């Protein structure tokens, strides 16, 4: 199972009036890496709900509506937080009911935002995988449209629309750096820029879903812990994300917990950009030296979410 550029382009047309075209800023690559070149930050944390997730959610729901497949029970999603927010927001905008199943470890800031969107919130289990099994069963029992957090074609294609924006907003790119959890963003971005730019996938050492799958030759379960586990908390890379990454020969790098914390602090100190640890993971791949750009490389980093407690941004 995979997606095509045509799927991403169709998603862009479908969701255009429902999502923000998020801005970019240029940063000094030489100062960060001692390597001459150009770099941009894609500020997707400014998307509705504070992450890229509404892109895929709108695409999934709107396509089902177009095809007459949206049931009266509405939609259901299992999430560590951001996917739930994306689905709940899309559902609220489209006037349909939404049920979100979260693990009990979900951050309070995300749970409170979900309730403000009038979603029905259920908390079950300690990790995303627990919530996923509950949501799948409830979808079967109620007939609700199941919106996967990262492993459905419509979801992945919707996430890739931010990369189409990036190509329009920047000069010619060589590289796009993204954080990886379940791989929906990775799949969409890699598909959108195939033949135009390469993709570097950054993961925490404490949650190496893609890195382990690429080394093993197939998706496998991994143990997931660490500061970014609320947003990069999938215990297995999605089938679509793995297939796209393997076919495109995506470069996979790992970063430490300390590197993620430092990257988040740097974004706040240097640009007053507040992001969650999952979004800082992509930046950590660059500033920690896990990914070393070549001379005169043109690269972009996706800051994918900002649903965080700002109290510890400077620590």
Image: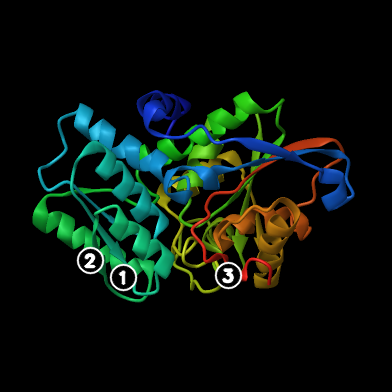
Q: Quadrant of residue 157?
A: top left
| Helix, strand or loop status at disc 1 | helix
* Along the viewing direction, whichever of 8 and 76 lies nearer the viewer: 76
Identify the residue shown where x is 65% and y is 71%. Answer: 257
* 178 on left or right of 54: right
Determine whether label 2 and label 1 are within 8 Å by CB.
yes
Q: Quadrant of residue 240?
A: top left
The image position of residue 294, as x and y in percent, is 83, 42
Identify the residue shown where x is 11% and y is 50%. Answer: 143
Identify the residue shown where x is 16% and y is 38%. Answer: 70
Determine whether label 2 and label 3 are within 8 Å by CB.
no
- Please give the residue where the numbered disc 3 appears in the rendered image: 311
Of pointers 3 and 1, the one earlier in the residue sequence? 1
The image quadrant where one finds the C terminus is bottom right
Mark 3 or 1: the one toward you = 3
* 298 on left or right of 283: right
- Please give the residue where the numbered disc 1 appears in the rendered image: 130
Of pointers 2 and 3, the one earlier in the residue sequence? 2
Is residue 59 shown above or below 258? above
* Along the viewing direction, whichever of 185 and 105 lies nearer the viewer: 105
| Helix, strand or loop status at disc 3 | helix
Q: Residues within 10 Å of mark 1 (few under 14, many from 20)?
A: some
* Along the viewing direction, whichever of 48 and 234 lies nearer the viewer: 48
Q: Residues within 10 Å of mark 3 (few under 14, many from 20)?
A: few
Answer whether residue 193 is visible to the viewer in this image: no
The image position of residue 299, as x and y in percent, is 72, 39
Q: Residues within 10 Å of mark 2 (few under 14, many from 20)?
A: some
| Helix, strand or loop status at disc 2 | helix
How far apart, in angstroms, are the residues tagged by discs 3 and 1?
A: 29 Å
- Please give the residue where the numbered disc 2 appears in the rendered image: 134
The image position of residue 287, as x and y in percent, is 76, 56
């Amino acid at each position: 199972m995979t997606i095509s550029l045509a799927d991403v382009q169709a998603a862009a047309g479908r969701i255009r009036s429902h999502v923000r075209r998020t801005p970019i800023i240029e940063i000094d690559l030489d100062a960060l890496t001692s390597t001459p070149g150009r770099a941009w930050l894609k500020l997707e944390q400014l998307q509705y709900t504070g992450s890229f997730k509404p892109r895929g959610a709108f695409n999934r729901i709107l396509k089902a509506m177009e095809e007459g497949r949206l049931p009266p029970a509405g939609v259901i999603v299992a999430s560590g937080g951001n996917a739930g927010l994306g689905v709940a927001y899309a559902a609220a905008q489209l006037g349909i009911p939404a049920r979100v199943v979260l693990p009990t470890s979900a951050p309070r800031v995300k749970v409170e935002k979900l309730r403000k969107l009038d979603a029905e919130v259920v908390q079950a289990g300690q990790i995303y995988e627990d919530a996923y099994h509950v949501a799948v069963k409830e979808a079967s029992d109620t007939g609700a449209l199941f919106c996967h957090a990262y492993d459905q074609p419509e979801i992945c294609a919707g996430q890739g629309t931010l990369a189409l924006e990036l190509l329009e907003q920047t000069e010619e790119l060589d590289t796009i750096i993204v954080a990886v959890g379940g791989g929906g963003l990775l799949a969409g971005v890699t598909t959108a820029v195939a033949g135009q730019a390469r993709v570097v996938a950054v993961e925490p050492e404490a949650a190496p879903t893609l890195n382990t799958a690429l080394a093993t030759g197939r998706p496998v379960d991994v143990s997931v812990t660490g500061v970014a586990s609320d947003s990069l908390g999938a215990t297995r890379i999605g089938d679509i994300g793995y297939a796209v990454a393997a076919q495109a020969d995506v470069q996979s790098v790992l970063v430490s917990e300390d590197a993620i914390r430092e990257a988040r602090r740097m974004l706040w100190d240097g640009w007053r950009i507040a992001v969650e640890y999952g979004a800082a993971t992509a930046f950590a791949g660059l500033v920690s030296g896990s990914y070393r750009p070549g001379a005169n490389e043109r690269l972009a980093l996706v800051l994918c979410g900002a649903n965080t407690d700002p109290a510890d941004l400077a620590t």
